[in-house]
Amino acid sequence: MKPLNPGEPRQVGRYRIIAEIGEGGMGRVVLGLAPDGRLVALKQLHAQFAHDPRFRERFRREVATSRLVSGAYTAAVMDADAEAETPWLASVFVTGPSLKEAVDAAGPLPVESVRLLASALAAALTEIHRAGLIHRDLKPSNIILTSDGPRVIDFGIARVAEDAQDLTGTGAIIGSPAFMSPEQAGTGQVTGASDVFALGAILVMAATGRGPFTGPTAPQTLYNVVHGTADLSDVPEEIRRLAEPCLAKDPARRPTPEQILNHLGPVPPGVAPWPPAVHARIRQQDAEVRSVLALPLPVWRPPPKKMAPRTKKILFGSLAAVVLLLVSGIVALGLSIAEYAKPEDPGVASLAVTEAVSPERLRLTDPCKVLAGRFVKESGTLKPESGSLHPARCKYTGLNGVTFNLQLGESVTVSGLERTDRTAEGLPLLRSTISGGCDSVVQLPAERRFGIVVSRSGKEGDPCKSADDMLTAALARLRTHEVDRAGDPASILPLDPCAVADPAVVGKNIANAESAPRTLRICEWQGGGNTLTVELNLGAYVADGSPVDLGNGVTGDLRGAGTTKCTVHWQHRPLPNREAEHVTVMMLGREGSGSSCDPAKEIAASIVPKLPKP
């Protein structure tokens, strides 16, 4: 529980707000008190979603469909207002830690507790699916462990089955990578079997403390879900027999929730569901709630009456007329709105800056979205180049041909940079004028050899101030999801190049190999005088060299046969406008070590099966 900030509203609808419970991707959850004394968990949509018609529509559907769900292992919806300025939904408040919090704090659950968890989740899914819903985001943080069993909460992602994909938008992926089904990760048809897959992954996590597909990065985890084999090595045999069928790649081969219940049989009465450490945390949270309720409570006031719909329409029409007159006046004065008007709001930050500028995150970013529409007084509104061939760079043009170049995750050398007294999103701004214009730079907190760079060409005006302003705007936009590259499970661009080569094969060919990223999409291994480079990239692809069979139906091009430098290059998949995603493996051996092509071919062949299917 967290105290409310000074000045925050102390009442939402008919509920007095007591404290903050937590915050998630779509909204904030607060503890509320109903007029009849019942406690509620009241979820409020984040501001950026409240003003987005698509998300508001999703929230309306959530309200309508969540009311259909009931059952012993779900938190019932009590009240909602989808038309409020900040839409909200109130459900029954239950005391206890989430499954994630419990396992993180007390370790994996014993077998009997995991069996009870499986039975309760299967019963909850039976009720959810009976109402015609799919949860779509069943995960440990959405399961509360109460003193008499678990509760499935947050139906913010649950949707009427036939409407689910229409509401989420083409190509959108909703869910948590470690507990997402292969069809959901691959934007396939999502059914109730997707929730069963999540149930299986949750049982593995509850029994071992980790998910069956969890990788070092979110893209790698998604790849493992779609293409990898579940890691069940530490799962107790009894739980493994239960979880393994749920994790079948083919949805048709997974059991139904009813079949899981039949397999488990009746739950023994009077059994304490969790280990003592978890029950201690439940009692601690009960005490926290009682202490919060002991403080002076906000005065209850009747909710204000809503404005009649007809009045709203009249007001809206009047405002529209005033706006139309103002716009007409601006046009009459001859001002160019397209060139000089300030851009739309840059978006509400939903990511911490350290996460927003991590290498994993930047691999998912479209550089031509970051500064699109940004405004500089002397340069107007920036427009990105069309048809950019580089996945981490984009050129923007403003008034009078002034250009800015944005580079994400480029290698930077601090010795050639000057320090400034400016910061952006808490990160120090560095600067270089070697290029003739001005480069503004921030280093990535997680990998300081890399940076985000905005270069301003020319010397007109104050190029360094312009570059600094643009980098500040870029960092603010990077903290939103407006810059995300369109999700494509076949793409290699989100992958970490240091994770695609088989470590055993690399170690066989390079003694004492140590990897080091050179850019977001280039990794280098060195050892024993040999150097290996792996690059995952986007651009024009030209077949150049001798054909070489890499297995799995992939033919590459080999250059440098018989020399100490050998390159294997192949096209992963073609794209429009003669572009392609492609992979390059280069082996540079020490003098006198013989040809480097056999090691290069072996390492390339080990990479092919680890890439997503094109």
Image (cartoon, rainbow, N blue to C red):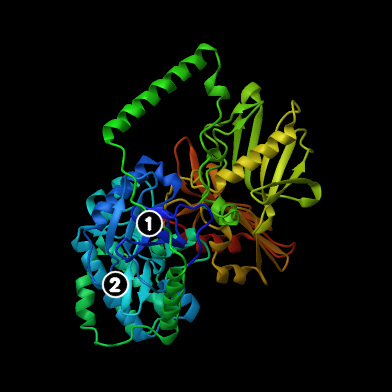
Residue 374 in percent (x, y) is at 58, 34
Determine the residue positioned at 69% across, 39% down: 468
Looking at the image, do the residues carrying marks 1 and 2 touch, with CB atoms under 8 Å apart? no
Residue 149 in percent (x, y) is at 31, 78
- Amino acid at pointer 2: Leu
Residue 171 left/right relative to 340 = left
Q: Residue 250: in sight, yes or no? A: no
Mark 1 or mark 2, whichever is nearer to me: 1
Residue at the disc numbered 1: 300
Residue 554: quadrant of the picture? bottom left
CA separation in Å, label 1 and label 2: 37 Å
Quick check: 129 above or below 472? below
Residue 371 in percent (x, y) is at 57, 37
- Amino acid at pointer 1: Trp
Residue at the disc numbered 2: 121
Toward the viewer: 497 or 325?
325
Residue 369 in percent (x, y) is at 53, 39
Toward the viewer: 141 or 85?
85
Quick check: 461 above or below 308? above
Residue 256: quadrant of the picture? bottom left
Residue 117 left/right relative to 426 = left
